[in-house]
Amino acid sequence: MSFGIPFFPQEASSEAGRIDALFYTLLAFSAVLGLALAGLVVGYAVKYRVGSKADRTGKRSRSLPLEMSWTIASLVIAFIFFGWGAALFVRRDHPPADALEISGLGKQWMWEFRQPGGQREINELHVPVGKAVVVSLAAQDVIHSFYVPAFRIKQDAVPGRTTHIWFIATQPGRYHLFCAQYCGTQHSEMGGWVIAMAPEQYAAWLNSQGEGETLAASGEKLFRALGCSGCHGASSKVRA
């Protein structure tokens, strides 16, 4: 009986299973080691309790091979877990070259996304199943954090810089999107949905939204409106 607690949360991305495997292996190892140590503590506490007839005359003894064995074994196990985690960490920073890139902006207190064709979304992000998606994140005001538990991904959106997170959705559905960084009084209300769709449904959805202004087009307008093109434009006669 789970009492509504998701002890085994939904896995809906290509990386979720890999991350869960590391987590549950670490959990099992920690549980076994913790129970073994707790058993020794309780066993010796009972054996040598006040008034017991346990033999206390034995001399202290040390075994160098035994001490070296558990020290080396601990080192090897630590490096195994480190290497496993490092491989996952490096993988999360190297998306496939053909990934679909979507822009995301966090601001108090909402998420705004822009598809490659310029289609905008508020607190919803539509993505195709089976396709690598890179979300390029920025923040308008304070630090926010893009967090989708079912995908096992989380990445901060930081003012003044662009960060990236990628995933491949494996199942169609609606998945909760949260801000995992306290960002002000309405932080708890800053949520949304990632909607994973079959590729043909995603294409139909894009067509139904029409075309919007891409980031490149918006940037070009600012480039000219702010006078940057006077010095930096391809045809300008004055050079900065």
Image (cartoon, helix red, strand yellow):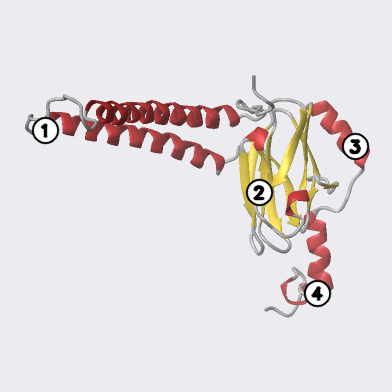
| Picture disc at residue 180 | 2
Q: Residue at x 73, y 41 (%)?
A: 177
**Which of pointers 2 and 3 lies earlier in the amino acid sequence?**
2
Q: Secondary structure at mark 2?
A: loop
Number of other residues with Cα within 10 Å of mark 4, as a class: few under 14, some 14 to 19, many 20 or more: few
* Extreme-top residue of the structure: 1
Q: Is residue 215 left or right of residue 137?
A: right
Instruction: Give the Cα separation between the discs numbered 2 and 4.
Output: 35 Å
Q: Which residue is mark 4?
A: 226
**Which of pointers 2 and 4 lies earlier in the amino acid sequence?**
2
Closer to the camera: disc 1 or disc 4? 1
| Picture disc at residue 64 | 1
Q: Residue at x 73, y 76 (%)?
A: 231
Quarter of the figure that contains the N terminus: top right
Q: Residue at x 77, y 72 (%)?
A: 229
Number of other residues with Cα within 10 Å of mark 3, as a class: few under 14, some 14 to 19, many 20 or more: few
**Which of pointers 3 and 4 lies earlier in the amino acid sequence?**
3
Between 206 and 71, the residue placed more toward the observer is 71
Closer to the camera: disc 1 or disc 3? 1
Tell me which corner region of the image, top left, top right, bottom left or bottom right, holds residue 92.
top right
Q: Secondary structure at mark 1?
A: helix
Q: Which residue is mark 3?
A: 207
Q: Is residue 52 left or right of residue 184?
A: left
**Which of pointers 1 and 4 lies earlier in the amino acid sequence?**
1
Between 213 and 77, the residue placed more toward the observer is 77
Q: Are marks 3 and 4 in contact (CB under 8 Å)?
A: no
**Which of pointers 1 and 3 lies earlier in the amino acid sequence?**
1
From the top left corner, tell me how far across and down residue 11 is, in percent. 64, 27
Position above or below: 105 against 5: below
| Picture disc at residue 164 | none
